[in-house]
């Protein structure tokens, strides 16, 4: 009974680029809302609007040719596959599908016109209600997290203070309206924040301050998303692959420890796959011709279409029909019928064939790897490596100057004795070779290559063997039927011979939605007896301020 009461008072927060998941540790599922906020502009103020989907790069003839070449390559690969009954796959010609879609006319539903809701909202709008605002209206729209990290930029609201203020407003709103927790009672609750596996130390300090001071939780702790995922899946170890809306990250976790050298994050995810799908749908005469991916409602429509029609099921051949509805304010509802073929298989495979991601420029964005503490100096840490290096250098210079003034410079027998602090060389500490994640042409490797590269950075052979044997897929960006088997086949071809044994891809642990695996793991972790040592109160945090 006491555990249940404790779980009721623990709030688990998992912020993402697209959705925020938040709920009590005792809840079966978290509350999920669009992780966005709109603020009314002051008269004459600057305009800023984050898009729901990643922006499309300017299309050149060279880019379009690269896209077409990759599309044809994947299409030919799919046609060379066989179905589960041993028969060869077949596909409906794209020209035939395009001819059908060109003839398709929408069914207009009478008396279904709605209006934009700008006039009925206040100065701040949060969550899905942001989608009810006129894109050309008086609001600036912000997504506080993009590509898996704080959305810092030079525009309005892009400062660290501005982004943290947005997070405070969104999280506080959900706590009050969805979880019904009064700000006056917040000190009675504990918070667990799920953070990225690759993090910025300075931002972690800001998160702690946000939870304990701005939101007013009694105590809290932070947990890395990949570590939480293994708890949620009930696994002691795994190579965790987290495909979110705007980022994909890989790392190897064993006994609650994420090995730093194995961590890598790429700036592509489900949102980029959505853009690829939209490009493919346009090639086969998408019947909703007014669709604009920069429009928030159209972006959400494309996002849902991807989730509903995207798959990698080799037994599905030929064309299929899909009905969908478009309901834009100030226009009547329109019902469409769309015919699609292998386009809905090609788009999900773009995370393995990154040439298609040239559409958003994500295929050449440099990967992120975990920086050591010495490469992330923190101004409030008096034992920080950068602080020690700089103060050590200054002390050395002062001593030399004093000695020169007295005319008595003493040289040590070992010159390196003077350089003890400077021995903390960031360049020497950075062992990760990011070039392993690029192909010769400067393009990012596919996800299957990234998994192998991550596992190969494990410190010993036994750990590598364990990681090849258990690959855990989490996140909402890779929820396509059959993609686990496809990934398993790709990885199997690349596993070194000495590690080839039974290996498995866990895509739905315990029949759980992979979107909430990390959230659920953080909830489980917060209720363990061993978690008692993890909690930090405001006074403890204020006195230490170290991460």
Image (tube, rainbow, N blue to C red):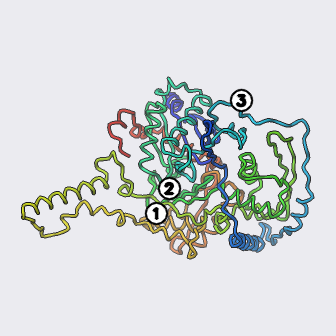
Q: Position of residue 482 (x, y in %)?
A: 71, 60
Pointer 3 residue: 120
* Residue density around tag 3, few if under 14, some if 14–19, many if 20 or more, within 10 Å: few
User: Closer to the N terminus: mark 1 or mark 2?
Assistant: 2
Res 230 visible: no
Instruction: Find out whether the residues at labels 3 and 1 contact each other: C-beta distance under 8 Å.
Output: no
Q: Residues within 10 Å of mark 2 (few under 14, many from 20)?
A: many
Judged from the image, the secondary structure of the residue bearing numbered disc 2 is strand
Q: Nearer the N terminus, badge 3 or badge 1?
A: 3
Query: How far apart are labels 1 and 2 at the CA level?
Result: 9 Å
Residue at position x 28%, y 50% in the image: 383
Q: Quarter-wise, where is residue 408 in the image?
A: bottom left
Q: Position of residue 537 (x, y in %)?
A: 39, 33
User: Visible in this render: residue 178?
Assistant: yes
The Cα–Cα distance between marks 2 and 3, rounded to whole angstroms, is 50 Å
Residue 467 position, x and y percent, is 51, 62
Residue at image mark 2 = 237
Chain-order first, disc 2 or disc 3: 3
Instruction: Identify the residue at the far front of this view.
Output: 44
Q: In this rendering, is residue 516 above or below 500?
A: above
Q: Is 302 positioned to the left or the right of 456 in the image?
A: right
Query: Cα distance, mark 3 to mark 1?
Result: 57 Å
Helix, strand or loop at label 3? It is helix
Are circles 1 and 2 on residues that touch, CB within 8 Å? yes
The residue at which mark 1 appears reads as: 463
Is label 1 in a helix, a strand or a loop? helix
């Amino acid at each position: 009974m006491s555990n249940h009461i404790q779980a009721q008072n623990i709030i688990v927060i998992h912020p993402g680029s697209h959705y925020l998941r938040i709920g009590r540790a005792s809840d079966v599922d978290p509350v999920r809302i669009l992780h966005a906020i709109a603020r009314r502009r002051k008269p004459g103020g600057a305009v800023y609007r984050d898009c729901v989907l990643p922006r499309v790069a300017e299309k050149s003839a060279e880019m379009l040719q690269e896209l077409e070449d990759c599309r044809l390559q994947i299409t030919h690969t799919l046609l060379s596959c066989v179905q589960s009954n041993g028969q060869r796959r077949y596909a409906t010609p794209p020209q035939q599908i395009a001819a059908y879609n060109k003839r398709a006319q929408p069914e207009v539903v009478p008396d279904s016109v709605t209006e934009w809701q700008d006039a009925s909202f206040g100065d701040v709008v949060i969550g899905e209600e942001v989608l009810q605002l006129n894109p050309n209206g008086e609001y600036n729209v912000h997504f506080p997290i993009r590509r898996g990290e704080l959305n810092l930029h030079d525009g309005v609201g892009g400062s660290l203070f501005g982004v943290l203020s947005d997070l405070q407003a969104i999280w506080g709103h959900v706590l009050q309206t969805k979880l019904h927790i009064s700000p006056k009672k917040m000190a009675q609750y504990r918070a667990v924040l799920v953070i990225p596996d690759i993090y910025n130390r300075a931002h972690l300090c800001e998160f702690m301050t946000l939870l304990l001071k701005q939101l007013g939780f009694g105590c809290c702790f932070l947990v890395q998303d990949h570590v939480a995922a293994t708890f949620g899946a009930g696994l002691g170890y795994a190579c965790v692959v987290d495909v979110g809306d705007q980022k994909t990250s890989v790392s190897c976790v064993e006994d609650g420890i994420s090995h730093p050298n194995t961590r890598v994050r790429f700036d592509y995810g489900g949102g980029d796959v959505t853009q690829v799908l939209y490009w493919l749908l346009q090639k086969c005469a998408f019947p909703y011709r007014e669709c604009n991916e920069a429009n928030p409602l159209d972006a959400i429509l494309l996002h849902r279409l991807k989730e509903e029609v995207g798959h990698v099921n080799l037994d599905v051949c030929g064309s299929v029909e899909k009905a969908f509805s478009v309901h834009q304010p100030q226009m009547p509802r329109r019902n469409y019928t769309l015919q699609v073929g292998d386009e809905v298989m090609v788009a999900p495979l773009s995370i393995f064939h990154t040439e298609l991601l040239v559409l958003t420029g994500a295929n050449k964005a440099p990967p992120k790897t975990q920086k050591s503490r010495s490469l992330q100096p923190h101004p409030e840490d008096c034992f920080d490596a950068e602080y020690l290096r700089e103060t050590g250098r200054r002390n050395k210079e002062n001593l030399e100057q004093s000695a020169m003034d007295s005319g008595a410079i003493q040289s040590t027998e070992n010159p390196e004795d003077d350089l003890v602090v400077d021995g903390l060389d960031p360049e020497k500490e950075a062992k990760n070779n990011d070039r392993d994640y690029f192909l010769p042409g400067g393009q990012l490797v596919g996800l299957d290559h990234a998994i192998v590269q991550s596992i190969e950075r494990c410190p010993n052979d036994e750990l590598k063997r364990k990681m090849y044997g258990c690959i855990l897929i989490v996140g909402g960006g890779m929820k396509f039927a059959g993609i686990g088997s496809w990934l398993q086949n790709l990885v199997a071809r690349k596993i070194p011979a000495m590690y080839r044994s039974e290996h498995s891809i866990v895509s739905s642990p315990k029949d759980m939605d992979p979107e909430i695996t990390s959230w659920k793991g953080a909830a489980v972790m917060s209720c363990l007896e061993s978690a008692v040592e993890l909690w930090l109160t405001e006074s403890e945090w204020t006195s230490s301020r170290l991460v």
